[in-house]
Every structure is written in C-alpha cells, then in structure tokens.
Amino acid sequence: MIKILAIVLTIGGMISLIMGVLGIFGDNMTSLNPWALTILGGVFFIAGVSMLKYRKDQPAPSEGE
C-alpha cells in the first residue's frame, strides 16, 4: 500500500514539476501560479522518491515462529 502511494506521489510530482517549469519559462497552461506548481511538484517528487528508497519490504512472519 505504501509503495503504491509512493509511486503516485512520484508521478504526480513529476507532472507538477514539468507543468510548473514550463509555466515559468514558457506558456502557462494552467490558471495556477507556476511557482506554486514547481514547489509542490518538488516536494511531492522528493517525498515519493524517499518513500520508495527507504521502504523495506520484509516478509510477513510465519505463524510457527
């Protein structure tokens, strides 16, 4: 479950970062402030990558132990 959330955060952060940077240096395709999109995209991207990086997949303990 956490892995799915991390992937969603990473992809959402990438999209927001791209839209924000394009809005800053080119045409603003949204009605939102491009700086806000860039900052939020960076935060979400870093959070998603950190969750993927530090997620330790450990097997569930068996009932006999």
Image: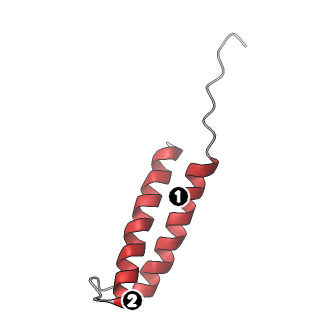
Q: Position of residue 8 (x, y in %)?
A: 42, 55
The dot on residue 6 is: none
Which residue, given by chain and number where applicable, does mark 1 sit on? Answer: 48
Name the residue type under label 2. Ile
**Residue at numbered disc 2:** 24
**Residue drawn at x 54%, y 70% as measured from the top left:** 43
Q: Position of residue 10 (x, y in %)?
A: 46, 59
Q: Secondary structure at mark 1?
A: helix
Residue located at (64% from left, 16% from top): 62
Q: Secondary structure at mark 2?
A: helix
User: Relative to 17, does residue 4 appear above or below in the rendering?
Assistant: above
Q: Position of residue 44 (x, y in %)?
A: 50, 66
Is residue 36 among what the camera can see?
Answer: yes
Examine the rendered structure and indicate whether residue 64 appears above or below residue 42: above
- Lower sequence index among marks 1 and 2: 2
Residue 23, image x, y percentages? 35, 86
The answer for how far apart the CA atoms under marks 1 and 2 are is 23 Å
In the image as oriented, which residue stretches furthest toward the right?
65
The reply to whether residue 33 is visible in this rendering is no
Local packing at callout 2 (Cα closer than 10 Å; few below 14, some 14-19, many 20+) is some
